[in-house]
Amino acid sequence: MSSTVVVLDYGSGNLRSAVRALERAGAQVELTADHTAAEAADGLVVPGVGAFAACMTGLTAVRGHRTIGRRLAGGRPVLGICVGMQVLFERGVEHGVETEGCDEWPGVVERLQAPVVPHMGWNTVSAPGGSTLFDGIAGERFYFVHSYAVRDWTLQTNNRTRAPLVTWTEHGGDRFVSAVENGPLCATQFHPEKSGDAGAQLLRNWVQTL
């Protein structure tokens, strides 16, 4: 029986393309804002496009931040995509305005320091060894559309805590976090649903962990 995945519908765009991509990856997918269904599914996907503050407002309206926290407390998988990744961090700063995020990871989402912003188009990533998301897709390119990202990774771990696997990407001389794997919580700054065969393989890799 295929794994069940909820794509959280909280007013952010590109939901249908994410649903279709996850279905092609082998999951049984439901698009809903219902927190009960989101908590019960084998996997939860949190998409996101646009502004950090607007996404946090929409997420809070459907109790998404609580749903994410409850799932992670029980070791249940969550995948954030694009701004859906950004809101997992401590806070975002856009146009001088700070907005609190879900605070699952410490870190600040800030404007890229590159000559050309937004960062739009295909780019490579530098994934660490042992990555599950990038298994079998080394050297491939993924599709990015964003002006903001986490440029400094500061998470501290103790000897009993496995360090997150952090993937980096460079754009215009600036470096930013393009993916994180941290137990049940994973996220990508790029759009796997728009990244062709490489993105499809990444989503299959994630679905197979459910």
Image: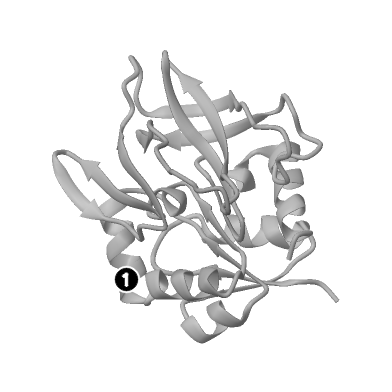
The coloring applied to the image is: one colour
Whether residue 61 is situated above or below residue 193 in the rendered picture: below
Q: Is residue 38 left or right of residue 101?
A: right
What x and y, as percent, mark residue 25?
77, 57
Label 1: how many Cα within 10 Å (few below 14, some 14–19, many 20+)? some
Instruction: Determine which quarter of the picture holds residue 174.
Output: top left
Q: Give the quadrant of residue 17.
A: bottom right
Q: In this rendered view, identify the residue nearer to me: 72 or 63.
A: 72
Q: Is residue 45 visible?
A: yes
Amino acid marked by disc 1: Thr
Q: Residue at x 32, y 71 (%)?
A: 60
Q: Residue furthest left?
A: 96
- Residue 4 lies, in percent from the top left, at 70, 74
Q: Which residue is mark 1?
A: 60
Tell which residue pokes out farthest to the right in this image.
1
Query: What element does badge 1 sit on?
Result: helix
Q: Quadrant of the N terminus?
A: bottom right
Question: Which residue is rendered at x = 48% and y = 34% of the image?
Answer: 177
**Residue 119 against residue 81 in the figure, above or below:** above
